Image: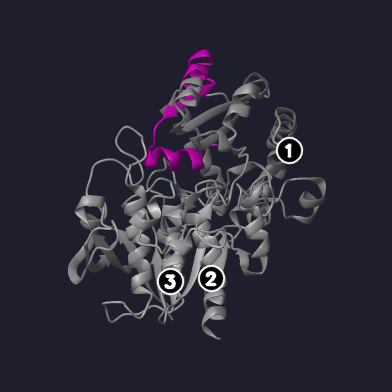
């Protein structure tokens, strides 16, 4: 089966969030099942540098305001799959991030940049493709490729089946109606049964409306996005298409995230040598300036510092958390006000709170290995990966039971402890009181080393690999190609 996986970012070449991790891992897992998968990527400088043996295979004309471009074929040497790269210097070869300029402002031509990505994806998935390799499935991801199913819908010839995966419904790619002509979409597309969304053009709405199948990154999130609370205006459409919507929990890269071989750790370990984890706890405290307090549970947090992630609630509860007793190590960046609030907290609670603002790959691995528990109080979380990294490292996650967090963490309550199924702690709703109650329960269990060890081993035994998820995606593909 031939699958074109169209995506705007992929780790390690360009990354802003979990989408890049999925784009790196899922195509590899699908390839391991025997599928013929090719990535379609924008030609950012880092992508052009990272792909090996890139060669020109087609020159594509401009259409509407979308400029002409070249299509290159190479090999994503760190991903193990072929890559089709859209070489369009005027849109993609620039400093800054994939969506924002160096000052954090959205690129003013994002509609053209990701309109081109979507247009090329649809072209390659149709009988108008200029290359010999023709996919049976076009797998789109988030708003940046959301127009591709719309382009396919308005194409009158043969086309591949299309899927769109929603990684985070909060980001929808909304632009003024004047962009319709620039994107070379017919005027009739601007309708409620098209790309129109509250008087604007929505890339994601287009994908949700026109794709043959919709997936999202956890079963619980698939239900949540059909509600007013988390539907972001698309809940009605998603409910109407519920029979074509399926939630498939993400996996993780079990090679990169393996405590037995992780080169970023002070000492490697696995379930049979879990006592060695303590060396990483000591090293983490030393590295970030926390006091060596053996009676304090060390809580790790690695997160974007945004409203979604709920870290403002942690700040409100901070005195009560530290009184457990506990220490907190935060690694992340985002909202300047939250960054400053965490810097201030670290200054006021020196030795008890560490706040490292920015991203540090090596330190993120040490936090996962060195913390006793890992806190994720997200207001919503389509899937989340850190809770699964934490489980693999024997660092018990403490999560708000939403989205993929609810699907991947079995809370330690009397029934799950007795059954031997607990893999962390979960609370709801997201309030200071509920979170503190859960933290007290976690701290109480941590002070019972034998019970804590049992839950650690249960968490480490959980299968978080991509294989099971890839099989489910394959089944979705198969259902679309058997007609």
Q: Secondary structure at mark 3?
A: helix
Q: Residue furthest bottom?
A: 483
Q: Which mark is residue 244?
A: none
**361 is within the stretch colored magenta:** yes
**Percent position of residue 109, x then y:** 32, 46
Q: Residue furthest front?
A: 187
| Image height of 440 relative to 13, above or below | above
CA gap between label 2 and label 3 equals 21 Å
Which portion, as a residue range, is magenta? Answer: 343-371
Q: Residue at 54% across / 79% down in the picture?
A: 480
Counting residues from the start of the chain, the first of labels 1 and 2 encountered is: 1
Residue at the disc numbered 1: 429
Few, some or many residues within 10 Å of mark 3 (<14, 14–19, 20+): many
Left-right relation of 63 to 430: left
Q: Secondary structure at mark 1?
A: loop
Q: Can residue 269 be seen in this snapshot? A: yes
CA gap between label 3 and label 1 equals 42 Å
Q: In the image shown, does 117 or 258 lie closer to the viewer?
A: 117
Q: Residue at 42% across / 59% down in the picture?
A: 145
**Percent position of residue 438, x then y:** 72, 35
Residue at the disc numbered 3: 152
Q: Which mark is residue 473?
A: 2
| Image height of 378 relative to 119, above or below | above
Q: How many marks?
A: 3
Q: Secondary structure at mark 2?
A: helix
């Amino acid at each position: 089966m031939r699958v074109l996986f169209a995506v705007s970012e992929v780790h390690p070449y360009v990354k802003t969030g979990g989408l890049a991790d999925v784009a790196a891992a899922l195509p590899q897992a699908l390839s391991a099942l025997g599928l013929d998968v090719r990535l379609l990527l924008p030609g950012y400088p880092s992508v052009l540098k990272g792909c090996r043996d890139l060669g020109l295979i087609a020159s594509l004309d401009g259409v509407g305001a979308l400029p002409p471009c070249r299509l290159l074929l190479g090999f994503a040497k760190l991903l193990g799959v072929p890559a089709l790269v859209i070489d369009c210097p005027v849109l993609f070869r620039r400093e800054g991030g994939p969506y924002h300029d160096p000052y954090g402002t959205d690129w003013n031509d994002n509609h053209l940049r990701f309109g081109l990505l979507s247009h090329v994806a649809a072209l390659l998935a149709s009988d108008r493709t200029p290359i010999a390799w023709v996919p049976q499935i076009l797998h789109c991801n988030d708003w940046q490729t959301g127009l591709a199913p719309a382009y396919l819908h308005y194409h009158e010839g043969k086309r591949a089946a299309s899927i769109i995966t929603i990684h985070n419904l909060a980001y929808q790619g909304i632009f003024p109606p004047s962009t319709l002509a620039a994107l070379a979409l017919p005027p009739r597309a601007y309708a409620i049964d098209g790309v129109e969304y509250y008087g604007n053009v929505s890339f994601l709405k287009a994908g949700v409306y026109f794709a043959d199948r919709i997936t999202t990154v956890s079963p619980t999130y698939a239900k949540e996005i059909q509600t007013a609370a988390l539907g972001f205006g698309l809940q009605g459409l998603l409910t109407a298409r519920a029979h074509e919507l399926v939630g498939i929990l993400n996996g993780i890269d079990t090679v990169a995230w393996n405590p037995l071989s992780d080169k970023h750790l002070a000492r490697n370990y696995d379930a049979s040598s879990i006592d060695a984890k303590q060396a990483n706890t000591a090293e983490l405290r030393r590295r970030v300036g926390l006091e060596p307090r053996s009676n304090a549970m060390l809580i790790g947090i690695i997160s974007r510092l945004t409203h979604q992630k709920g870290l403002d609630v942690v700040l409100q509860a901070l005195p009560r958390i530290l009184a457990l007793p506990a220490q907190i190590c935060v690694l992340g960046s985002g909202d300047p006000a939250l960054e400053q609030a965490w810097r201030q907290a670290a200054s006021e609670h020196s030795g008890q709170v560490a706040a490292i603002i920015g991203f540090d790959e090596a330190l993120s691995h040490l936090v996962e290995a060195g913390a006793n528990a890992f806190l994720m109080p997200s207001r919503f979380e389509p899937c989340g990966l850190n809770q699964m990294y934490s489980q693999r490292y024997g660092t018990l996650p403490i999560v708000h039971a939403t989205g993929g967090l609810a699907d991947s963490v079995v809370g330690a309550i009397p029934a799950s402890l007795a059954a031997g199924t607990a893999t962390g702690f979960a609370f709801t709703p997201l309030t200071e009181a509920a979170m503190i109650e859960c933290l007290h329960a976690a701290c109480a269990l941590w002070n019972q080393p034998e019970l804590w060890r049992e839950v650690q081993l249960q968490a480490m035994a959980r299968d978080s690999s991509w294989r099971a998820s890839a099989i489910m995606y394959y089944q979705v593909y198969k259902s679309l190609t058997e007609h």
